């Protein structure tokens, strides 16, 4: 496992800063209580959850590899629950094909959102079957503690077989939708970041190789694993799809 110090001090959270070391100090006073997550769209039972409501889904430990698209990696012991527990409760209708997630928009607290370079709020999406896979969790903690702001407090997504940018932080809205959502990264650089973003050593980023990765805390590099090592659990989701397509 990656040291707690590294997990909580080397962060990508552009709402606070593009400097990984600046995120922890800048997010120190981020207000995460009270907090609600509104779940709606194409569902039979729309519902607004408090964090206490979400904690009732349980907290199990999941030790997952996290692979950033920038070619560094960590191993993190998350606490959380499968997203499918929440989705079953709100009952997606048959028209729902995708899940769209949104981060809080609050430029007063999140200085990075004053930059016009990105289309805030941060948005991410999954296909409904990807969202229902047991590996997909909503995380409320790591290393046995509640999440710190820099890791996406009070609740964030973790999708271990996809590049880290899919694992959206500090979620306030989850909507079931019919059409593929446009994520912040798809809008910012459509030639570089696609919707699927499955970890794949054979498909390079247009500006760098994805064949190997730097594991934080280790010297040297490791080979990148297809689906970040979770091929057995998730390859069925992409049967018939061309995995050599970079997106
Ligand atoms: N979520 C939001 N809202 N904003 C971000 O900038 N960065 C992503 C992802 N989730 C990001 C985000 C990226 S690129 C990565 S690699 C992971 O968060 C990093 O998670 P960590 O800092 O907890 O390791």
Image: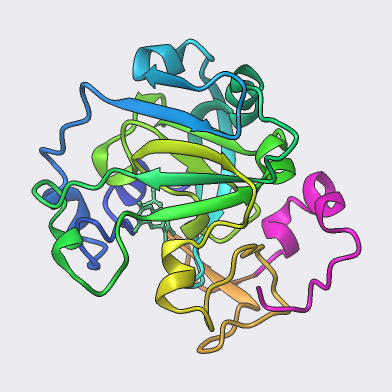
Looking at the image, residue 161 sits to the left or right of residue 94; the answer is left
| Residue at 54% over, 84% down | 191
Q: Is residue 231 magenta?
A: yes
Position of 187 with respect to 44 (left or right) is left
Q: Nearer the viewer, residue 230 or 92?
A: 92
Q: Quadrant of residue 11?
A: bottom left
Q: How is the image coloured?
A: rainbow
Which span is picked out in magenta? Answer: 224-247
**Which quadrant of the figure has residue 179?**
bottom right
Residue furthest right in the image: 240
Position in image of residue 20 (x %, y %)? 26, 63
Which residue appears farthest toward the bottom when viewing the image?
207
5 horizontally vs 142: left or right: left
Where's ligand 1: which quadrant?
Answer: bottom left
Identity of the residue drawn at 64% across and 48% down: 178
> Which quarter of the rendered picture does the C terminus lie within?
bottom right
Q: Is residue 71 above or below residue 23?
A: below
Q: Is residue 124 above or below residue 148?
A: below
Q: Would you say residue 171 sits in the magenta stretch?
A: no
Percent of width and height locating residue 33: 21, 23
Relative to residue 53, is residue 222 depicted above or below? Answer: below
Q: Residue at x 48, y 37 (%)?
A: 174
Q: Position of residue 168 (x, y in %)?
A: 43, 49
The percent coordinates of residue 149 (x first, y second) are: 25, 40
* Circle count: 0
């Amino acid at each position: 496992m990656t040291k707690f110090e590294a997990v909580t001090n080397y962060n990508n959270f552009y709402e606070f800063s593009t400097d990984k070391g600046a995120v922890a100090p800048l997010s120190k006073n981020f207000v995460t209580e009270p907090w609600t997550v509104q779940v709606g769209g194409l569902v039979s039972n729309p519902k607004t959850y408090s964090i206490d409501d979400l904690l009732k889904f349980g907290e199990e430990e999941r030790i997952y590899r996290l692979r950033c698209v920038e070619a560094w990696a960590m191993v993190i012991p998350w606490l959380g629950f499968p997203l499918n527990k929440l989705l079953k409760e709100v009952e997606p209708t048959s028209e729902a094909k995708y899940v769209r997630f949104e981060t809080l928009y609050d430029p007063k607290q999140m200085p990075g959102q004053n930059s016009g370079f990105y289309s805030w709020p941060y948005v991410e999406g999954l296909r409904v079957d990807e969202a229902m896979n047991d590996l997909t969790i909503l995380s409320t903690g790591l290393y046995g503690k509640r999440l710190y702001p820099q890791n996406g407090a009070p609740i964030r997504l973790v999708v271990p077989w996809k590049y880290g940018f899919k694992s959206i932080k500090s979620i306030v809205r989850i909507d079931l939708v019919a059409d593929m959502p446009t994520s912040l990264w798809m809008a910012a650089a459509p030639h570089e970041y696609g919707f699927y973003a499955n970890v794949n050593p054979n498909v390079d980023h247009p500006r760098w190789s994805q064949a190997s990765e730097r594991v934080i805390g280790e010297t040297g590099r490791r080979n990148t694993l297809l689906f970040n090592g979770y091929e057995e659990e998730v390859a069925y989701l992409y049967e018939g799809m061309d995995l050599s397509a970079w997106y």
